[in-house]
Image (cartoon, rainbow, N blue to C red):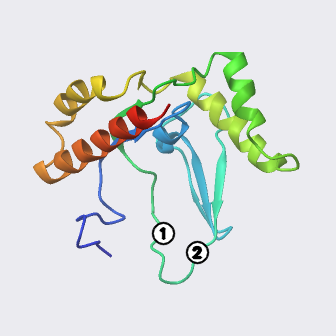
Amino acid sequence: MRDSASGFSPSSQPLALLEIGASAGLCLIPDRYAYCYNDIVHIRPASEVGVAPPIFSCETNLETPIPKRNVEVVWRAGLDLEPIAVHDNDKVAWLEALVWPGEQDRLSLLRQALSVARQAPPRQLCRGICGLTSLLLQLRLRLTQHWLSFIARCLLTFHLSMNALP
């Protein structure tokens, strides 16, 4: 199944990930997590992570393509005005406080993801539009002009929205 607008298909590999508003960068490391689809299909992390990875469960229908392996990430970076360092206990405590009371499963997954991220923290840039040139130069070798244009528009929107804040 291919999305004609983006050219993306679930089997498109490898991936370059750019997260805007990355917080602790936990969404930048999907290849270091495990997945369970319909309590049957288990996908292990793409590489050994040194700690027990979180296992994210997903229920699908018959039309949903289920991957046979984990994603391959060849480049990753996060852009945030105030990224959360995974080794900063005060900032991590604040992040954990954002999980609703009674959501122990989510808190457990967050803590496991933080443990994985501490092994090799994803690269994050603490700036808005200033990091755009550097990121686009790094991505240039791996992405088509269509995607570079899309990313540039996203980053520009991010910059404009941050400047609109009081």
Spot occupied by residue 139 in the image (x, y as percentages of width and height): 21, 36
**Residue 60 disc label:** 2
Q: Are marks 1 and 2 in contact (CB under 8 Å)?
A: yes
Relative to 145, residue 86 above or below = above
Q: CA distance from mark 1 to mark 2?
A: 8 Å
Nearest the camera: 103 or 161? 161
Q: Looking at the picture, does residue 133 appear above or below residue 99?
A: above
In percent of width and height, residue 64 lies at 48, 76
Please give the label number shown on residue 24: none
The residue singled out by tag 1 in the image is: 66
Q: Amino acid at mark 1?
A: Ile
Q: Judging from the image, what secondary structure is the residue with disc 1 in?
A: loop
Earlier in the chain: of badge 1 and badge 2, it is: 2
Q: Viewer-nearest of labels 1 and 2?
A: 2
Q: Amino acid at mark 2?
A: Thr
Name the residue rendered at 64%, 39% in the picture.
53
Q: Position of residue 126 (x, y in %)?
A: 42, 21
Give the answer, above or below, for where 39 lies relative to 98.
below
Label 2: element kind = loop
Query: Dot 1, how many residues are within 10 Å of its Cα: few (below 14), some (14-19), or many (20+)?
Result: some
Residue 40, picture quadrant: bottom right
